[in-house]
Amino acid sequence: MAAALETTSQTRSASPAPAKGASRQRDIRLDVFRGLALLFITVTHTGRNWLMELLPSHFGFSSGTEMFVFCSGIASGLAFGALFLKRGFAMGMLRVAHRIWQIYWVHIASFIGVVALTMLLAGWFGRPDYVSNLQQDVLLTHPRQALFGLVTLTYLPPLFDILPLYVVLLAMIPLVMAARRLSPTLPFLLVGSAYVYLWTVGGPDLPGNPINPSQHWLFNPLGWQLLFFTGFFIAMKWLPTPAPGTPWALTASVTVLLASVPLSWHVLYENFGLFSYIREAVLPANDRSHFHLLRFVHFLAAAYLAVSLVAAYPGLMRSIPARILAMMGRETLAVFVASVPIAIVSGTMLDAYGTGLDIVLPVTLLGWAALVAVAYVTATLKARPWAKAPEPVEAAGAAAPLQLAMVGAKSPVRPG
């Protein structure tokens, strides 16, 4: 993916400059991968959906979350990093602050909506445990602490971890851009030092439950910022990447992916003691929350192979599925927010009616179709069709009714 963007950037630099007022051409590959990540995340969030066992994340260390965060880093570099360079530091900070403000309130509003939905489903199906399973009962039993935790991002129930992480990562962009002003290598030292600090000194672990001090954020920003800013640096062309299809890079990527299978696929490491021993030795319990280096290496290998595949078969990006995924990727925030209630409703359906293939498959497909519908409606509303001027009526077409009215009295009336 990174190399694909680098190649695209080189192609654009060789092409004539667009006319003034022309919109910047989007790289469909970035949107396609973001849309794919959203589909994976929705399946993972759906309770009792055994199709998650077939996702790539069960055969390697990384998952759709890594894809989502990495693509967000690239998109932030293209949108915000470029603005810092073109419009200045103050305007860049203002734009980042505006985006943080949007995401913050979307997070709070979506939480309130999902709580209402969960309570409705719990009452409808007679399952009060639906509320407690998602730790939403904290809002009922300790409303003061829960509301304070909600607005301060210290109360993050399951399924509400990504947007707060994104808020913190966006807030770090001005620091990185300021570091770049001082030295070209300082942003890399800043990001690397924060990651090393987390894994050596430890912490800080941000609180995630106001009544349970031992519960912290599922995704520690100091760990996950490594992946986010890798995408950011690539988008800013600060970090070189091998071209798609480079032999040594392909060999290294395939080796990493194959070596990770026996350490990630539970069928193998649960039945072979050697694999289980190695897994426990190299992967600590907090490998996901602190973003272990193996997850980082595995994702880069998977991303490079995906980019090389797209480069070898460019027609894939012109297919109908790719266009649908790209539409979802362009409306990432709206689709992601919608994916949470869709996953909850889908999980409730599976809990109520079973997990046979005849139930799981249509429920999953209907959930994906709902995500596509959200993307389509959002794109339509963003286009503001009501603000477009109506097309002018042709002169001949406009004159005809007038002429007919003028001679209507003399025209013969045909019998009905």
Image (cartoon, grey):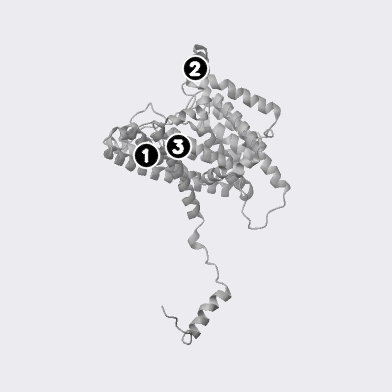
Sequence-wise, which precedes: disc 3 or disc 1? 3
3D distance between C-alphas at marks 1 and 2: 33 Å
What residue is rendered at 62% in x and 32% in y? 304
The residue shown at (66%, 28%) is 250
- Of callouts 1 and 2, the N-terminal one: 2
Residue 166 at x, y = what percent? 49, 39
Give me the disc on residue 345: 1
Inter-mark Cα distance, 3 to 2:
26 Å
Dot 1 crowding, Cα within 10 Å, few <14, some 14–19, many 20+:
some
Is 93 situated above or below 295?
below
Residue 134 occupies quadrant: top left
Question: Eyeballing the image, is 29 above or below 212?
Answer: below
- In the rendered view, does 82 fall on the left or right side of 219? right
Q: Quadrant of residue 341?
A: top left
In the rendered view of the protein, which quadrant contains the N terminus?
top right
* Labels 3 and 2 touching (C-beta < 8 A): no
Q: Is residue 16 left or right of residue 195?
A: right
Residue in front for this viewpoint, 111 or 312: 312
Q: Which residue is mark 3?
A: 42
Residue at image position (66%, 25%) is: 251
**Going from the N terminus, do you reach mark 3 or mark 2 first?**
3
Q: As shown in the figure, which amino acid type bears the numbered disc 2?
A: Tyr
Residue 254 placement (x, y as % from top left): 62, 25
Residue 142 in percent (x, y) is at 29, 35
Residue 377's x, y, as percent? 46, 51
Q: Is the residue 253 above or below the residue 35 in the image? A: above
Q: Residue beneath label 2, please?
A: 269
